[in-house]
Amino acid sequence: MMNPILFALNPILSAIGVKDKQVTSLSQETDGIFGYIQSVIHEKPETDDESPFMVLDLGVVMDLMHNWSKMLPTVQPFYAVKCNPNPSLLGTLAALGSSFDCASKSEIETVLSLGVSPDRIIYANPCKSVSHIHYAASVGVNVATFDSKEEVEKIRKWHPKCQLLLRIKPPQDSGARNSLGLKYGALPEEVPMLLQAARDADLTVIGVSFHIGSGGADAKAYHAAIAAAKNTVLRDYQLMELELDDWLVFPNMGAYTISSGTNFNGFSTSAIPTYLTYSTTVVREKNTTS
């Protein structure tokens, strides 16, 4: 009889981005993720003992998707690729049935390479280049965001079968570290004009989108943004005193961990290795309660 944990993991372990990589099982008996981190540090060669690394716990990803499906069974998640484009993470999410929010041709290409059908992709960029709109049309990505008459005209000309999501500007009290509302989104008084422009272009508006920003600390910001649609990186955090050869461990780094990094002074963020693991306790709990 197949181990239920392995059975639950089988689609993940065979997913693109995961299947050719080593995945280490974690358990509370071996101190879980922190015990694994210590083992990686101890096994690093002396010539590379200062290089940073990342650990991706696939069990946590599975648990988050399970909780989403349980709490919001009628809501399909569209993961924003720009948050963390790690191939193993994207492959895992694809295997778990997630859809994707792509902001560029490159991100669309990445998601399609995972075997994801184009109807699971939203082209979520309100200011797209003509060549990228044409590409989206050619591969069957038929839902996109807009917040201007100029964008409507481009889509009408280059992707007339595309359905639209009107991006609105949410209230500016979200507490987000980076508020993208300053760059994109229609004001309330602009909405009627934009809906009319879409109708005149014979394009169908199927919904509304918004972005409260990244690094937000107040979940109530979604209340105001959803209401408008209807009618963190650590901050000020003092580090402990460190000694030579100490390591800093940041658990649950969250969105934009990689994409917000830079190659300043020649330190390539893309070269930082990521170790794949899965928490057996997380998977076991899901199997015993289902």
Image (cartoon, rainbow, N blue to C red):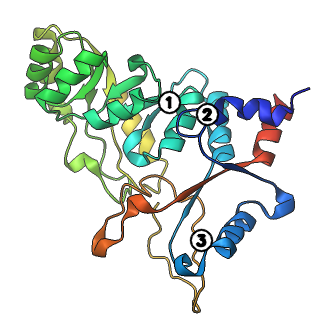
* Labels 1 and 2 touching (C-beta < 8 A): yes
Question: Mark 3 is on which residue type?
Answer: Val
Q: Between residue 70 and residue 160, name the one nearer to us.
A: 160
Q: Nearer the viewer, mark 3 or mark 1?
A: 3
* Labels 3 and 2 touching (C-beta < 8 A): no
* Quadrant holding the N terminus: top right
Q: Residue at x 25, y 40 (%)?
A: 169
Earlier sequence position, callout 3 versus callout 1? 1
Q: Residue farthest to the right?
A: 1
Is 113 rendered above or below residue 196? below
Q: In this image, 92 relative to 192: left or right? A: right
Q: Residue at x 18, y 25 (%)?
A: 133
Question: Mark 1 is on which residue type?
Answer: Pro
Question: Mark 2 is on which residue type?
Answer: Trp
Report the Cα–Cα distance between label 3 and label 2. Answer: 27 Å
- Which residue corresponds to mark 1? 77
The x, y position of residue 144, in whole percent, is 27, 24
Where on the picture, by quarter, is residue 141?
Answer: top left
Earlier sequence position, callout 3 versus callout 2? 2
Q: Between residue 57 and residue 232, name the one nearer to us.
A: 57
Question: Does residue 231 show up?
Answer: no
Describe the element under mark 3 as helix, strand or loop: loop
Q: Residue at x 41, y 29 (%)?
A: 113
Disc number at residue 68? 2
- Which residue corresponds to mark 3? 249
The x, y position of residue 204, in whole percent, is 24, 11
